Image (cartoon, helix red, strand yellow):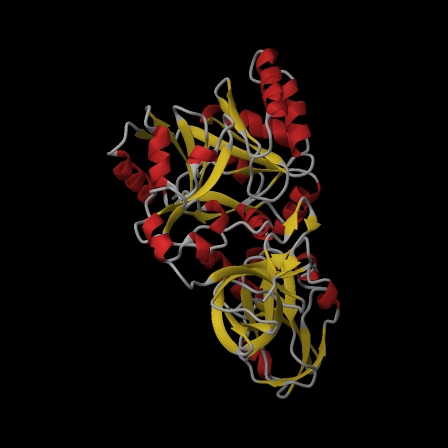
Amino acid sequence: MAEFPPELRYLKSHEWAKQQGDVVVVGISDHAQDALGDVVYVELPEVKAECQAGDEIAVVESVKAASDIYAPVAGTVIEVNAMLEDSPELVNEQPYADGWFFKIKMSDSSADEGLLTAEQYQALCEAEEH
Amino acid sequence: MGKKTPLFERHKSLGAKMADFGGWDMPIHYGSQIEEHHAVRREAGVFDVSHMTVVELHGSGGLAYLDRLLANDIGRVKNFGQAMYSAMLNESGGILDDLIVYATGDPYLVVVNCATREKDLAWMRQVAAGYECEVVERPDFAILAVQGPRAVEKVKSILGRELFGANPVGKDRVALIESLKVFQGGWCDGWFISRTGYTGEKGVEIILPEDQAVTLWDSLLEAGIRPIGLGARDTLRLEAGMNLYGNDMNESVTPHESFMGNTVVLEGRDFIGADALRKQSAHDELIGLVMAGRGVVRAHYPVFSNGAQVGETTSGAFSPTLGKSIALARVSATSANMTVGIRGKMQAVECVNPPFVRNGKQVYKPRKT
């Protein structure tokens, strides 16, 4: 069974977001990595890139398909996960830990209020499967 | 719900991710497609390919019929049981399907793709009307492909034990495998075993009665042979430079546009599509592409030569063996400056002649432009 850590927030498009002060760490959910299959490449955003919530900001390529990654909040990219360059499999192995994608410094600290809770997101995933 | 092979419950209990494939519920992977790919390149793996369509050609006119039906020349096949790869063409020279025929006399044994089954059977029966030849589908067969550098030795070790009753049968099957040349098959007590495959590795394909498939499957897994899904089958065949019908060829292209010119024998022959091929002059070509940079080339990406679009990719994937992306592309021209457009960005690619990988090793060579 896929894991849905309750402390995280989620997007319908299967990203997770973890708020740490005014910084949000972003990755893809366990459900998403399982559906994608082995991840072979992640095209990450440039550090200092600015984004609006909902912008296509990265691409994850698995053995199966290329999928867009959307910014969960507006802000500026301050760090990307360089480990993914040589070890894209971290996205499959540790989707909520070493498999994170990038960090955004929020331009509006209340910006993540529209995201889904773990419970809401899990319900969405289960509905997709049926 | 789609059609199920005799191994459907085995796939489910192994935790396979299942998906529809030509109307069949088939395993895509059992956890990690990349690990499965490496298992076939380095050790041995088994594929359930029972969805593929097995056809027998009964009657004394099989040879004459195949000479008319196929672009490749069955008359050149001399050894009993030798396999021949061929395209089956329409009158325009377009590829209806690609297939393997085993020169087993009456009945000949033919394996065609499952996605084209109905079209193929209708066409084959239509052509057969003029010959002493009856096209008989054999849906009662299962097919297991065992592939990899250790595949043959492991299959022999299993068959040498007491399996399926009396051991003499197993010994006969081992003797059959030992007698077969690469790309040759033969019957033994209801099984057709051939030294063929779709991976670029050594191995065997076993066509057997469907009620024996589970027993053989379980024995293969017990011997340490890994189950492999259709996901890895696709990357293995692409690395091996083997076309996939529906991707790399279809009814709108000829064998010469599909890197299959060496499977066409025109001289002195009158097969369906031959006249159209004789009239074909300048045509596109199917080539291999290797991308040095990061990213993944997939099917239907635009291909450019000196900045002008010359075609598109027909198959593309990340090659686990090479650690970079490879593709097949149908193009009207090549040059030293080839690129592929990936989400609007140009990525440099090298033009090569397939195959990319054989027997676990990189083998591709730069293509002369």
Numbered marks: total = 0
Image coords of residue B56 (percent x, y): 38, 29
Q: Is residue B64 above or below residue B98?
A: above
Quadrant of residue A40 within the rendered picture: bottom right
Which residue is the extreme one toward the front?
A: B268
Q: Report the front residue among B81 and B188.
A: B81
Residue B247 drawn at (x, y percent): 45, 56
Q: Residue at x 52, y 27 (%)?
A: B79
Quarter residue B172 falls in: top right
Q: Position of residue B40 (x, y in %)?
A: 65, 42
Asked whether B313 or B36 is in front, the reply is B313
Along the viewing direction, whichever of B170 and B303 lies nearer the viewer: B303
Q: Name above or below for residue B358 compared with residue B294.
A: above
**Horizontal and vertical percent for residue B177?**
60, 25
Q: Residue furthest bottom?
A: A107
Q: Please tell me in which quadrant of the rendered image residue B60 appears.
A: top left
**Residue at 58% across, 83% down:** A111
| A95 relative position to B313: left or right | right
Residue B45 seen in the current view: yes
In-front residue for pair A112/B38: B38
| Residue A7 visible within the image | no
